[in-house]
Amino acid sequence: MTSCFSRFRAVMAACIICLSVGRPLTAQKNIGVAFSGTAEAPTLTGADLNAGALSFDASKGIIITVSCAPPFDCTTLKAVDEAGKQNRFITSTAETAVTPRSITVSGGLPAGQMVITVSHGGHEAIPKLTLQGTASGSPDPAPKQPAVVPLKLRVRNKTCANIAALGVPESADFVLWLDGELLSAKGKMPRPGKPVVFYVIGDKTLLRNNTKITRTSAIRTIAFSSILGAGADVSPTSGLNRQGAAVIQCDTLRFESNEFASGAAQIGISVLDDDGITEEKNTFDFNVATLYTGAYAFGGIRSNSSSPTFGKVYNGADTVVSKTGDTRGGMLYVLTYTPFVWGSRDPTQWPDHWYQAVNPMLGVVLNDVSNNGIFGVSVDLHNYMSFTAGVHAARVQDLDPAANLAVGKSFDNRGATVPTTRAWTFNAFYGISFDLQGALGLLKMAIGAAPAAASASSSGK
């Protein structure tokens, strides 16, 4: 009897062992990840991360241990589900900044999928964690891989609705889509030597890790001087935004450079796919203003100077000295040069400060170059037009002091000419001038219109 009972116990033990071997206990899954990248753009990495697609036994739960190393601080780690809630998680408190921190999904949950967003210091980490809870004892499903969207479509995806919410400042010179298409621009043309600020908007994952912006146009060179008038003699493509394209999480990338030369300028936007091989290259073209150190101008002035002529006249009783051509306030034509003493500038734009519109000026009078000159100030008005005022120096005819003559006084030597000399006079003037290029353009139009008008007149006879 005893022998039979012993054999029964041995059989039962063997059955229990077989059952245990045939149905192993499932332990709680533990995944280790770590932060990489920068504190403002964190990335989760780990040997078992599987691009964020993790499966676990819903009855047992899962523990995700996050390690932190400078510049990352585990005390700022936060994990929330799709609805922004934390009630499904038990997150241990890190005692120090580098102490690993656990994100624990409790067991006893129904099978299904949940998405967890991990953030560091308020900055969302990539990738998000897609947790697939399975029924107890069922095999882990194959990880659900995200749909692969071609890089060309990701670059040209323009689904960012609220640009202002992305924090793009109004001071940005250009706001671009990731494919180089212009979204908005400041009114003023960029100037050489001044920073040009670009904000590129697009897929956050592409901007953070895979985008490179470079200046592709000529570098700025320092010119000795550039004088306005001295040389006188882009359609954006429509983006591809197909229905069904992946919804993107938008972000901005800031790029700044002050090395653009005057004229046509260009930047290149290069985006590398996740495979590290496929690359999408785009460009953005714009213009940079030309800075001038001064300007030539043509205009007219009204001067208080006169250019008299002396002679003799018989008044009925005697021959006396006479004076003619003493009219003041005549119109003179001038060619002037205005140096920009406050620094090189773009004349198409109003200066940063009002006083920079006031500069010294000097010039010659085209009516009589050798005997006239002007100097004073030039005040910019608008569209290459300026107001000028100052002193008109004129070398005019005057009676010879040695002859002791005066206008109206008797002149005894009736057969001789009245002795005169040349003397400088200084009087006030004012006028309006136009930059030389604009003035020559206007002159060419007038010259071209005159023959046309004459031809039309003759043909109408």
Image (cartoon, rainbow, N blue to C red):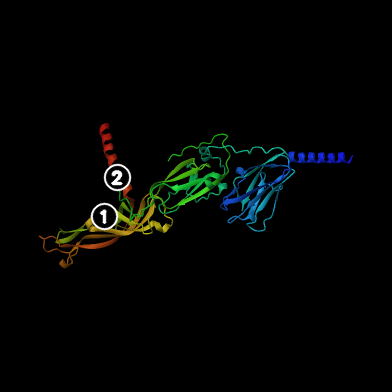
Quadrant in the picture for the C terminus? top left
Mark 2 lies on residue: 443
x, y (%) of residue 456?
28, 34
Q: CA distance from mark 1 to mark 2?
A: 18 Å
- Tell me: 392 left or right of 195: left
Residue nearest the observer in this picture, 262 or 296:
262
Kindly tell me whether residue 461 is visible in this rendering: no
Residue nearest the observer in this picture, 87 or 384:
87
Q: Are marks 1 and 2 in contact (CB under 8 Å)?
A: no
Task: Determine whether the residue tagged by mark 1 lies in a helix, strand or loop.
Answer: strand
Task: Determine whether the residue tagged by mark 2 lies in a helix, strand or loop.
Answer: helix
Which residue type does callout 1 highlight? Val
x, y (%) of residue 242?
54, 34
Q: From the viewer's perspective, is residue 109 above or below residue 194?
A: above
Mark 1 lies on residue: 365
Residue nearest the observer in this picture, 52 or 333:
52
Residue pictured at 51% horizontal, 40% vertical:
155
- Tell me: 331 left or right of 31: left
Which residue type does callout 2 highlight? Leu
x, y (%) of residue 363?
29, 56
Residue pictured at 26% horizontal, 58% vertical:
373
Residue pictured at 31% horizontal, 55% vertical:
337
